[in-house]
Structures are given as structure tokens and as C-alpha cells.
Image: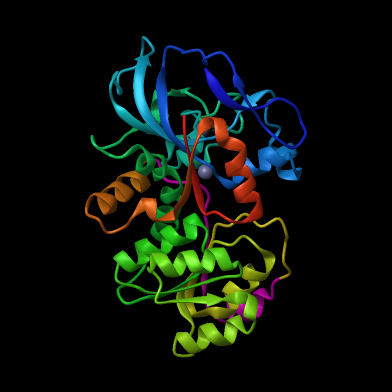
């Protein structure tokens, strides 16, 4: 089969022929119909410090956000059938540790990430996944939409952690795909949403999607003052930090209202110095962290909002390529000239 592969520990990829991954007794073989690029694919492409830290096996097939049709199942599979339309959850939990057995499989003590820790990902004609991470989509779901449940699930998780109240003012720092999904979900809940970013492409994209009342260009400075002005000086009831930078983490503590909530889920390479007494203790705020998605309440909730037309998963897609043109997708993303890019194997 054709696949987008990483063959050595240096920048770049190769589109080439490789063997189909082998099917174990509890696995399902999926014919991949749509698969989306994620930030982690860029780390692996560049083979930067983050990729080295993951200790990802090489050679490997990239990609983990995908949907497709089940074409074969292992002999012990009971929950999925040939012909099912599925999307892939990325967390591969051990199903045995304390976290797995107490409702938080997505932070399993022995977590493996599909597309990062296992050698075969979804940028290929076929992918093999354990049946526990095959999520059955409603029949008729377009493949591109199915491939985007996984990143939207992170946004849903952020909102679930924040547990918003009616009429909340929400500020979303960052207008990447997940930031845009948070904006849409919060608007669907009736929140007043304000967003920021520093990149022109993302600011314009967020304005076109239109889920935020105002999208502030943070590169023009005075972000804190402008957000305070837009929130009646009180600040935001909830700040979602979806940019993953030291400066936006500090900003989030500054712009949150007293007794508000800050939700951190951008992975920041920097460790900012924080005045926790002024900004957390005296303001009595809740700081919430999260990674990945609850399995599977985030998926079910995304499905309900998608089915009712309250959020539009395809709104973040800016480019689509055939598998053979995978390099073009990487180049666009590395230049910052794209939001979500989809490959169609
Ligand atoms: Zn992802
Ligand atoms: Zn576990």
C-alpha cells in the first residue's frame, strides 16, 4: 500500500510503498478515506526536540486523525463489523491501570499514542487499530468530517472541564483548529466569545468562521487592555489557553475575572514564571489542565452538536490533497498558510 513515511531521524517524509500493517485478534483493518494533519505530525516531520522526546519508532507511517471503512476484523473483535464507518481515537489505553479502571483511560499510566508510539499511522491506504479505539460514526458522515472528531474532541474536553454557566464570557487565546472548535462549542452554549491570535492567516480564518463576537489581533499589542475593554473591565469568566505559549499562559491569568476559570491545554515549550499569589490565590480562580479527550463522552457530545448543525467541523479545513501530495500539505503548515489540511488516500 502507499503511505507517508518517515524513514530516518532527519527532517522530511517519503511517499512510498510499504506492507499493510498486520491484524491482531482484537484489531480492525480500516481503509483510510480521510486523514488530517496535526501538530504532532509536524514535530515528527521536522524531527525536532519534541519528536526525539517521544522516542517514536523509525521507520514509521505518520498521521493519527482519520476516518474510513472497516474492511477486516480480528477473530476476537465483537464491537465493530466489516462495513462500519469509523474514526480513530488516538489514545491506546492499557485497560488495566488505575486511571483506565477509574474513568480516565485517556491519561492511562501506560498510554501509547496511535501515530506516535506505534510504527503505523493513518497517512496510508490502510490502518490497523485496536477495536477499543474505533469509534463508530453515524452512517452517512462525510469522511472529512469523521477525521475531525478527534481534534474537536480536545475542544469538547476543554469545554467539559470548564463546565460553563449560562451567559459566561469566554476568551479563547489561539485560533488554530482546536481554538476555533472551542469558539463554536461555546457559542452553541450561548456564551459571548472573544478570540485572539497573532497570525494574520488565523485571525482572518476565525473571522470568516464567525463564532467569536470579536477576533483581536494580538500582534498589535495591548491585548490585556483590549480584552478588558471587550469584557466590561471585569475580565473573562473562562479563558481557554489554546495557543501554547508562555506569554499567553501569563495573559490568561491576567484577563480572567476574579473567581473565573483558566483552562490550559496548549502544550507550551516554555515554562513561564507566574505570580501565583496575585493571579491565582487572591483572584480565587480555578486553573484546569487537560490533555486529549475523555473516552468517549467527548466523541458522543461532538456527534450530537454536529448532527444538530450547531458546530461545523469542516469550517477549519483550508486544503485537501491526495496522499501523493503529502509534502505540499507539510510545506503549507510549516509556513503557517493553512489551518486543517486533509489527505485523501
Ligand atoms: Zn491530533
Ligand atoms: Zn491504563
Q: Is residue 163 visible?
A: no
The one of 112 and 9 positioned closer to us in this rendering: 9
Q: Describe residue 199's horizontal placement relative to residue 151 as left or right.
A: right
Q: Is residue 294 magenta?
A: yes
Q: Is residue 176 in the magenta section? A: no
Residue stretch in magenta: 274-295
Would you place residue 260 above or below residue 299 in this image? below
> Whole-percent x and y of residue 103?
41, 41
Structure colour scheme: rainbow
Q: Nearer the viewer, residue 41 or 100?
A: 41
Q: What residue appears at the point 41 percent right and 72 percent down from the top-left corner?
A: 212
Relative to 262, 210 lies left or right: left
Quadrant hosting residue 12:
top right
The spot of residue 94 in percent (x, y) is: 50, 28
- Percent x, y for residue 294? 42, 45
Question: What residue is drawn where x is 45% and y is 85%?
Answer: 231
Residue at 64%, 75% (x, y): give it: 219
Count of residue discs = 0
* Location of residue 135 with respect to 230 vertically, above or below: above
Residue at x 25% of width, y 56% of height = 309
Above or below, 163 against 20 in this view is below
Question: In the shown orientation, is residue 22 left or right of residue 159?
Answer: right
User: Can you give x and y, in whole percent of width and height, for residue 275 in the image?
Assistant: 69, 76
Q: Is residue 183 visible?
A: yes
Amino acid at each position: 500500500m502507499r503511505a507517508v513515511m518517515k524513514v530516518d531521524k532527519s527532517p522530511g517524509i517519503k511517499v512510498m510503498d510499504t506492507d499493510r500493517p498486520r491484524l491482531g485478534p482484537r484489531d480492525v483493518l480500516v481503509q483510510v478515506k480521510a486523514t488530517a494533519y496535526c501538530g504532532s505530525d509536524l514535530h515528527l516531520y521536522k524531527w525536532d526536540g519534541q519528536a526525539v522526546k517521544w522516542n517514536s519508532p523509525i521507520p514509521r507511517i505518520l498521521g493519527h486523525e482519520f476516518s474510513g471503512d472497516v474492511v477486516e476484523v480480528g477473530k476476537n473483535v465483537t464491537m465493530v463489523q466489516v462495513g462500519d464507518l469509523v474514526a480513530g481515537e488516538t489514545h491506546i489505553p492499557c485497560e488495566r491501570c488505575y486511571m483506565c479502571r477509574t474513568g480516565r483511560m485517556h491519561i492511562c499510566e501506560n498510554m501509547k499514542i496511535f501515530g506516535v508510539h506505534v510504527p503505523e499511522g493513518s497517512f496510508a491506504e490502510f490502518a490497523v487499530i485496536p477495536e477499543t479505539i474505533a469509534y463508530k460514526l453515524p452512517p452517512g458522515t462525510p469522511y472529512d468530517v469523521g477525521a475531525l472528531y478527534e481534534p474537536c474532541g480536545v475542544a469538547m474536553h476543554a469545554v467539559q472541564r470548564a463546565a460553563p454557566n449560562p451567559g459566561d464570557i469566554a476568551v479563547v487565546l489561539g485560533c488554530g483548529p482546536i481554538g476555533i472548535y472551542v469558539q463554536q462549542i461555546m457559542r452553541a452554549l450561548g456564551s459571548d466569545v472573544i478570540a485572539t491570535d497573532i497570525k494574520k492567516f488565523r485571525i482572518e480564518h476565525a473571522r470568516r468562521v464567525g463564532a467569536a463576537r470579536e477576533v483581536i489581533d494580538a500582534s498589535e499589542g495591548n491585548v490585556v487592555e483590549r480584552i478588558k475593554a471587550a469584557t466590561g473591565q471585569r475580565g473573562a469568566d473562562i479563558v481557554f489557553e489554546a495557543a501554547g505559549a508562555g506569554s499567553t499562559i501569563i495573559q490568561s491569568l491576567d484577563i480572567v475575572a476574579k473567581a473565573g476559570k483558566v483552562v490550559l491545554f496548549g502544550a507550551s515549550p516554555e515554562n513561564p514564571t507566574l505570580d501565583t499569589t496575585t493571579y491565582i490565590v487572591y483572584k480565587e480562580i480555578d486553573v484546569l489542565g487537560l490533555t486529549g479527550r475523555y473516552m468517549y463522552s467527548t466523541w458522543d457530545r461532538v456527534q450530537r452538536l454536529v448532527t444538530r448543525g450547531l458546530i461545523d467541523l469542516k469550517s477549519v479545513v483550508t486544503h485537501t490533497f491526495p496522499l501523493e501530495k503529502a509534502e505540499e500539505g507539510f510545506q503549507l503548515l510549516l509556513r503557517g498558510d493553512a489551518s486543517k489540511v486533509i489527505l485523501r488516500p
